[in-house]
């Protein structure tokens, strides 16, 4: 089963709409017409409309960083799947560890968002990963397995090709510490095993599992060459076109 690499930039709470214009312009020039690797940018909500216009004629996909599970109603400050679709958003990051840590999101509630996303033709990028404490206590695989099972409960098997997972060890996010290639591969292979138990072997083989946590141009190639690492969710290095496109180039070289 050949899985196309996906390199997704998670801009977090960075970049105004006008700053996005500069960055996306550079990304378009550099990698916006190639189709070997799928490229996605995930700006803040306020830069989505602008970015949507900028990527319209390119091969770059648009993603958002969160979404509410409800379709509409009295949910002050929230954004629905339909609102995202209206801006031609394709991917939505769900359950990022910063949302779990700072906004109290838990896997069972994130599950409702994952299901709402896929029902609305958005591709969820469901994030999972252990804390340093959990890794040191030898709980990594148990924690990640539980996050996968809870977050993907009732996911429709016939939509499995739209599902993306991102393994992001919390201790590696924004810290400059990266999981070793072996650590990443071990967890990715285990995630694929859980997916096989839940959805069957062939469905499991079609799901892309991204690595996230201090991925940079100089460590991307060795991480991406692991058999179960199908791309990257890039934070810090997605904020400059040079670093971000360098990671895309690393994936292209392996394709
Ligand atoms: P980082 O962030 O690349 O800055 O470590 C990754 C993420 O949080 O998605």
Image: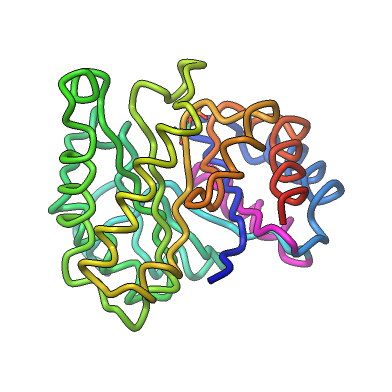
Query: Residue 9's x, y, as percent?
Result: 58, 42
Please give the name of the residue rendered at 74% of the width and 56% of the height, measured from the top-left corner: 54
Magenta-highlighted residues: 36-57
Find out whether residue 52 is within the magenta segment.
yes
Q: Left of 88 or right of it: where is 208? A: left
The image quadrant where one finds the C terminus is bottom right
Q: Residue 73, relative to residue 129: is it above or below?
A: below
* 105 and 149: which is toward the camera: 149
Q: Left of 241 or right of it: where is 76? A: left
Please give the name of the residue rendered at 84% of the width and 46% of the height, measured from the top-left corner: 30
* 171 and 179: which is toward the camera: 179
Please give the name of the residue rendered at 52% of the width and 65% of the height, measured from the top-left corner: 90
Query: Residue 196's x, y, as percent?
Result: 28, 67
* 198 and 116: which is toward the camera: 198
Q: Which residue appears farthest toward the right when viewing the image?
A: 29
Number of numbered labels in the structure image? 0
Colour scheme of this structure image?
Answer: rainbow
Among the 4 quarters of the image, the one containing residue 55: bottom right
* 245 and 46: which is toward the camera: 245
Q: Residue 89, relative to residue 242: is it above or below?
A: below
Q: Residue 103, relative to residue 86: is it above or below?
A: above
Find out whether residue 208 is within the magenta segment.
no
Query: Residue 153's x, y, as percent?
Result: 17, 65
């Amino acid at each position: 089963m050949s899985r196309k690499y996906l390199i997704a930039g998670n801009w977090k709470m960075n970049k105004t709409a006008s700053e996005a214009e500069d960055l996306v312009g550079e990304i378009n020039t550099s990698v916006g017409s190639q189709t070997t690797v799928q490229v996605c940018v995930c700006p803040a909500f306020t830069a989505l409309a602008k970015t949507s216009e900028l990527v319209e004629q390119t091969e770059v996909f648009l993603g958002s960083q969160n979404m509410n599970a409800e379709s509409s109603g009295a949910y002050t400050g929230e954004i629905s799947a339909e609102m995202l679709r209206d801006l031609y958003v394709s991917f939505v990051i769900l359950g990022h560890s910063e949302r779990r840590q700072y906004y109290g999101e838990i896997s069972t509630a994130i599950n409702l968002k994952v299901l709402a996303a896929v029902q609305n033709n958005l591709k969820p990028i469901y994030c999972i990963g252990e804390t340093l404490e959990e890794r040191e206590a030898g709980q990594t695989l148990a924690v990640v397995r539980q996050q996968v099972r809870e977050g993907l409960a009732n996911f429709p098997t016939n939509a499995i090709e739209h599902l993306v997972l991102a393994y992001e060890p919390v201790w590696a996010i924004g810290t400059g510490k990266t999981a070793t290639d072996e650590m990443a591969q071990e967890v990715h292979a285990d995630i694929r095993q859980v997916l096989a138990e839940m959805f069957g072997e062939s469905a499991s083989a079609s799901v892309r599992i991204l690595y996230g946590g201090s991925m940079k141009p100089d460590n991307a190639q060795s991480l991406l060459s692991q058999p179960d690492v199908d791309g990257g969710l890039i934070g810090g290095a997605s904020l400059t076109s040079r670093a971000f496109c360098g990671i895309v180039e690393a994936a292209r070289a392996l394709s």
